[in-house]
Amino acid sequence: MGTWGTGIIDNDTSNGVYSDFMELYAGDFPVEEILQRIVQENQFEINDYYERNNFWFAIGLASWETMSLNEETFQKIKEIIVSGSDLKIWKELDAEDKTSNKRKKELERFLKKISTPRKRPKPKSSIKIKPIFDKGDCLTFKLDNGNYGGAIVLESDKSSEFGFGYNLVTTTRINSKTLPTLSNFLESEILIINFDPETIKEARKQIVWFQPTHYRKRYSDIYSSIGSIEIKEEFTYDGSTYFGSSGWHLIKQKCDNQFDYEITNKKPTETIMVRELIKTLNN
């Protein structure tokens, strides 16, 4: 349970569930469909002793803010808080008394808040989902061959009109036995794939807008940031210039597939350097 505070959504599970809910809400999905979808996608969290409370707290907050909190969910949350079962878990995880007391007050305030319906739903235009990474972050990950791979975050889109927390990421051809440096990232090539002949030309260059959806609970153990490089150019998410995805695993997967393919086959003839990419995309 990745926790960084005592607030209702101050942990990986609740923050991720809340963000997923609000992103779909801002995208005009019916709240009934959103709830059904979130429940289906989070069966592990719902059935996990240490995570289920965080799941329902996130659902409760998002539902209350969108004026869709049903009685069943409210009673479930009320039982968790009144019974003290959440505080019991915190004590089992060795939380200090001071921290547990702060959590207790947060839970009491939360229950009081959702006990009274909002006067109006949260405006969709006000929803801003925080991107996973900051612009310029250089990400490393372990390849199947044991080496380090790398990717660069070109943009961190904090607009609510289109991006909803998207990160524009370019995967590089870094394939290093040692942890790459920031200089290695700047001097690297971007990854262009040719292992799959059915991939259309526009999708061969690995430059993708990634949604924050599911990152924290599915992919956060794959990538690490070793630092940041300066990228002055701005990239705007418009829904068409680059492909979009929520599958962060594809960054590593495409590297593994391409490098494995190149053991017995030639790499693509086209070459684009990172410095060239950053420069030419904004000419």
Image: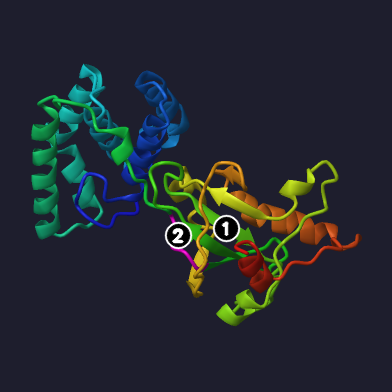
Q: Residue at the spot x=11%, y=34% of the render?
A: 113
Task: Determine which quarter of the picture holds residue 107.
Answer: top left
Q: Which residue is nearer to you in this view: 104 or 257?
A: 257
In the rendered structure, find residue 169 and report the number of the disc placed on it.
Answer: 1
Q: Residue at the spot x=64%, y=56% of the render?
A: 252
- The local crowd at label 1, few if under 14, some if 14 to 19, many if 20 or more residues have their Cα within 10 Å, is many
Left or right, 153 with reference to 242: left
Q: Would you say residue 147 is visible in this rendering?
A: no
Q: Would you say residue 73 is visible in this rendering?
A: yes
Taking the view exactly as shown, the residue that stands out farthest to the front is 283
Percent of width and height locating residue 135: 47, 64
Left or right, 59 with reference to 267: left
What is the C-alpha distance between the residues marked 1 and 2? 10 Å
Count how many numbered circles sit on residues in the image.
2
Q: Which residue is nearer to you in this view: 274 or 71?
A: 274
Whether tag 1 and tag 2 are in contact, CB under 8 A, the answer is yes
For marks 1 and 2 on the same chain, the one whose residue lies earlier in the sequence: 2
Which secondary structure type mostly characterizes the magenta part of the structure?
Answer: loop
Left or right, 141 with reference to 41: right
For the magenta stretch, what is the residue range? 132-137
Percent of width and height locating residue 213: 46, 43
- Amino acid type indicated by mark 2: Phe
Q: Which residue is mark 2?
A: 133
Q: Residue at the spot x=14%, y=35% of the render?
A: 81
Q: Which residue is nearer to you in this view: 73 or 161?
A: 161
Is residue 166 shown above or below 53?
A: below
In the rendered structure, find residue 86 and report the number of the disc placed on it.
Answer: none
Q: Residue at the spot x=63%, y=79% of the render?
A: 184
- Amino acid type indicated by mark 1: Val
Task: Determine which quarter of the picture holds residue 264.
Answer: bottom right
Q: Which residue is nearer to you in this view: 39 or 246?
A: 246
